Image (spheres, rainbow, N blue to C red):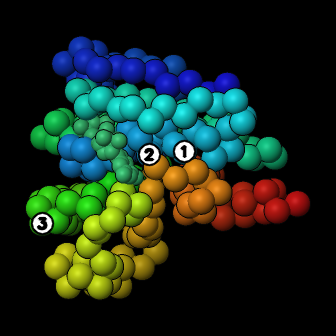
Amino acid sequence: MSSVTMSNGGLCCGSGPDSPTDDTDDILFIGLQGSGKTLLGQRLRTVYGKASTAFRLATTETNGSQDFRIPTFKGCPFKEIRIRECGGSMQPLWGNWYSQPIKGVVFTLDVSDPTALAAGGMELQRVLQQPELSSKPICLALTKVDLPFTVPRAELDLALGLSDLEDLYPSRLRITAISSMRSPDECPELEALVDWMIEVKAGDQAVLLAKRK
Ligand SMILES: Nc1nc2c(ncn2[C@@H]2O[C@H](COP(=O)(O)OP(=O)(O)OP(=O)(O)O)[C@@H](O)[C@H]2O)c(=O)[nH]1
Ligand SMILES: [Mg+2]
């Protein structure tokens, strides 16, 4: 069964990028406080995880960083994707992870909270312009789409220029809309996101052919 290991001390308590670890992280999860990183990590474990994988609906603020190990599909050349979530409260220190040997980034943006969109959009722009990340794929995950009020994609395009960003970074930026409250059956974008992370880790789209056999 996959595991979630907590390292709430983050950089200051020895779990940061300078600390020796057995494994390297594959994907970095960043996004403003409360934008849904932890619940997404917990939900993604259930996509290819055993039916018995417990899904925890509760989250607490991530004060530091934490790992998620996401099982991959049967036949995949590797058993898991390792995610490093950096809490929103650690935003000034996110940059410390950019030069680590991560393969890609998931940036979460809560589209149910119009008051946080401008700050989230500006941070996304900053992340896209980071020289250390210039060769790394980035997935913008628009979160909490199950809630009754969410800002429509057309308004996000106007306010944050998302379509322009897609045109500017055609092979690097992927945008998806997801709900971690829904099961993978109810929200197929969750499986598509795990598949994207598998492709990013493998560095080869052909890795997904094994799934279709
Ligand atoms: N309705 C709904 N609520 C969500 C969703 N994702 C997260 N939440 C809720 O939003 C709140 C914050 O979610 P977290 O996953 O803890 O957010 P986070 O990005 O990890 O926050 P930090 O660790 O503080 O950076 C929690 O109450 C979650 O239950 C979603 O897809 N739908
Ligand atoms: Mg969190």
Label 3 within 8 A of ligand 1 by Cβ: no
Q: Residues within 10 Å of mark 3 (few under 14, many from 20)?
A: few
User: From the image, which quarter does the C terminus lie in?
Assistant: bottom right
Q: Which residue is mark 2?
A: 40
Place of residue 115 in the rendered image (x, y in percent of width and height, measured from the top left):
11, 62
User: Could you say which quadrant of the image residue 81 lies in?
Assistant: top right
Neighbourhood count class around disc 2 (C-alpha, 10 Å): few under 14, some 14–19, many 20 upward:
many
Q: Is mark 2 within 8 Å of ligand 1?
A: yes
Query: Which residue is identified by label 3?
Result: 118
Real-space Cα separation, disc 1 to disc 3, in angstroms: 27 Å
Looking at the image, which residue is at 42% across and 79% down?
170
Percent of width and height locating residue 208: 72, 60
Which badge, 2 or 3, comes first in the chain's sequence? 2
At 72% across and 36% down in the image, what residue appears?
Answer: 51
Q: Are the residues flagged by discs 2 and 3 in contact, CB closer than 8 Å?
A: no
Dots 2, 1 in contact, CB < 8 A: yes
Q: Is mark 1 within 8 Å of ligand 1?
A: no
The amino acid at mark 2 is Leu
The single residue placed furthest to the front in the displayed view is 148
